[in-house]
Amino acid sequence: MTRLMVLALSCLTAAAPVRAARGEIHAIVAGADAYRHVPELAGAVSDALDLADQLTWLGATTSRLIDGGLNRPALMAAFEATLAAAGPDDVIVFSYAGHGLQIPDQNGDEADGYDETFVLPEYEPGIGDRTNLILDDEIDDFVRRAAPRPVIFVADSCHSGTMLRSVDPRADHRRIRSLPRSSFGPTPEARARPIAADRALPPDNLLFVGAVPENLVVQEVLIEGRPRGALSYAVARSLGGSSDLDGDRVVTSDEMSAQVVQMVRALSEARQTPQVFTGIVRGRPLFHLPEAAPVAPVKAMAKALDLEPVRVATPDDGGPMPVLGALEGAVLVATAADAELIFDPATGDVLTSQGDQAARLGPARGQDLLQGIVDKWRLLGALESRIDGSVEARVWPDDRLFADGASFEVEISTERAGRLVLFDLASDGSLIQLLPRAGQAAPEVAAGSTLRETFRAGPPFGADHLVAAVLTAADADPVVDLLRSVHGRPLGTGEAERLVRMIARGDALFVPVYTAP
């Protein structure tokens, strides 16, 4: 694992939050879809442009390196110009969206024997083309030269690895942002070796946000009808102020990290968990938010609480399913590549846009059941737009596909005190109340507390979404009353709208859990 990408939580400084002077922001935003010799991507340029727009709104001086404009001379020149222009109180941002690749270590400083690289659009496979790769060592050098100015590095790509859950071929439309090691060319096999202690930890001026651990891949996701990188989208939202938990118009390193991790997990259906580490003092202000409203697309990201329509389709070779056109809150689209939910009329399976089996309906797939599933996913979309990092959740041991009878734990942490309400939206849309238990009030949770609950996989199989909400006692009671009234059945459209509005008075988050027979 490269020294720049290592998860070094020990670098977190335990100092009290600090207030810094209002420095300027200098940003380099890079993104590539149009690769000449390797598979093209679909959302990396959109990612880069969205981030650039948000940084400009924050007042940043921004260099945009897109597709053909992203080459080694241009990027190195941008690095040097940024170092020359940035003052001692300024913040530097570097983001990259595109392909990643691992190649044999070039200078003997990698414990695993491989350098992580970022792939430029002119990269040619099979010939050992280093000219069109940017090595992690080069970025590490840039970050160290920038010290003591903080550098925020956003890497929306991956270098090698596999998926936690396989992709159903009926929904296999999303691009993967990595190239296999073999694409570099015939080279000696890499060898692991010890590295010097002073280079084993990341620079103490770095906040790194990577899309996934290096053993997993980055799959583009469908967001508002177009392919995107979940990490870039989440960072753009944070830059737009959605992670400003205390409302002081300042985004700190802690606030940004917490929101980005939970947003990416929600957008990717827990296929991605970003890797975040920082040597920057905890609580350091990164961005001071302007009073003006954020520019698009963040304005669209902060959706109203109304339940948005869900794009639905059948598999491209699956034949028509007329009942879809009669579903309330569903928009029928022509191809599965443009759909958030894919209904297979031959099997009764419901697939997500990323290739998970969301529900296994079999022959029992009447309009009422399909409507319940649509309402569930509309509710999740509304909750997704509210994620701000105040509630965090993880599945342990990981986000694999859990077989019938398998046990797993869900860990929920909250930044604010209140009453915890927990319920499950099952794969068929049914709501199952979990906390509070029968005859009890919603349990109190303290600020900074963590709760772990153990569950066991069982029918109905597919996508369960555990929803946690932290509310005041006055707001929790009516939510509990509503949950008890619908326990064991799908929410109606009106009930889902009421529930979203009630939960929005507090802090809420959902946790995807996928199960199979």
Image: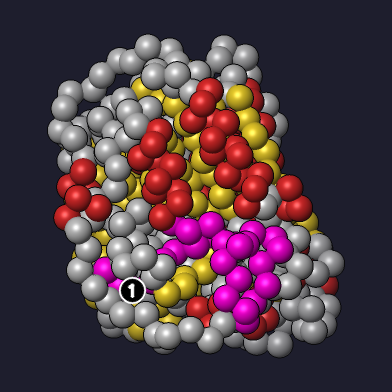
Q: Which residue is mark 1?
A: 113
Percent across and percent down for residue 173 are: 69, 72
On-image quarter of the C terminus:
bottom left
**SS class of the residue under badge 1?**
loop
Q: Residue at x 31, y 67 (%)?
A: 108
Residue 5 in view:
yes
Percent across and percent down for residue 18 are: 26, 19
Q: Residue at x 62, y 14 (%)?
A: 292
Residue type, numbered disc 1: Gly
Q: Nearer the viewer, residue 333 or 208?
A: 208
Assess disc 1: are there few (<14), some (14-19) or many (≥20) residues with their C-alpha within 10 Å of its C-alpha.
many
Magenta-span inclusion, residue 42: no
Res 497 quadrant in image: top right
Question: Relative to residue 216, is residue 327 depicted above or below?
Answer: above
Question: Relative to residue 149, is residue 515 depicted above or below?
Answer: below
Percent across and percent down for residue 360 are: 55, 80
On-image quarter of the N terminus:
bottom left
Q: Residue at x 45, y 49 (%)?
A: 139
Q: Nearer the viewer, residue 338 or 3?
A: 3
Percent across and percent down for residue 499 are: 49, 42
Residue 369 in view:
no
Which stretch did the figure color magenta? Answer: 111-136
